[in-house]
Image: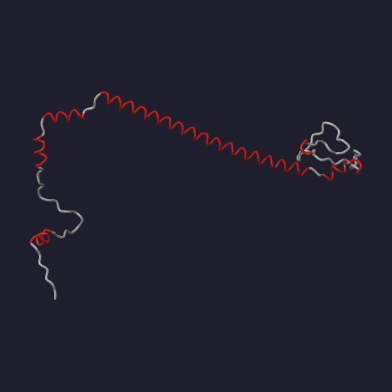
Amino acid sequence: MAARRVQTGRQRNRAARQMYVYGNVAAKPSCEPTRREEEEQRKQTSSQVRKNRRYALRMNPGYVMFLTVAAICALFICVNYVKLQSRITKCSENITALQAELTDMREENNTRYNFVMDSVNLDEIRTKAQDELGMVYASEDQIIEYTSPSADYVKQYETIPEDGVIAQSDKGVD
């Protein structure tokens, strides 16, 4: 069984008020309602309240001075910020230029180093030392092996002892 729905008077009025409007512009009402509430409120406010409102809207000299000082401080901070940004930009550009110069110098240094290393012929130096200068390799009896207290190198300030030990620490002696 189909249930029948009964519309109340309120639902019928709502359906009658809703009209379909073509387009995207709503129709402007022929007359706008007057705002009686605002007019009544204006009449109800006393002269003292209106005077207090006007006084609150005025700016006194202390407030003007405060705003002036605040504006000057803000301007000072902004100018210093712009100067600082400018200095940072200049330093950044200077660093970039110095890095480019360093790269060029390293490249030139490597090129010169490779040129010098390529120009040195060790066989030619050995031949010249042996033939022209009369130099010879050291014989076995001329070689003294020694133990060094440091692993890197030794500066010789005196002759090497016959036993080959240059220095010993006190910790190794029992």
Residue visible at 12% across and 29% down? 48
Q: Residue furthest top?
A: 61
Q: Is residue 30 left or right of residue 59?
A: left
Query: Which quadrant holds residue 67?
Result: top left
| Along the line of sight, the residue nearer the viewer: 148 or 79 | 148
Q: Nearer the viewer, residue 57 or 106?
A: 57
Which quadrant of the view contains residue 68? Answer: top left
Q: Nearer the viewer, residue 14 or 88?
A: 14
Residue in the image at 9% along x and 35% along y: 44
Q: Is residue 4 above or below residue 130?
A: below
Q: Position of residue 115 (x, y in %)?
A: 74, 42
Query: Where residue 102 sits in the image (x, y, percent)?
Result: 62, 38
Q: Nearer the viewer, residue 153 or 88?
A: 153
Give the x, y percent position of residue 7: 10, 65
Where residue 39 sits, quadrant-wise, is top left
Q: Quadrant of the C terminus?
A: top right
Who's the residue at 39% across and 28% down the image? 76
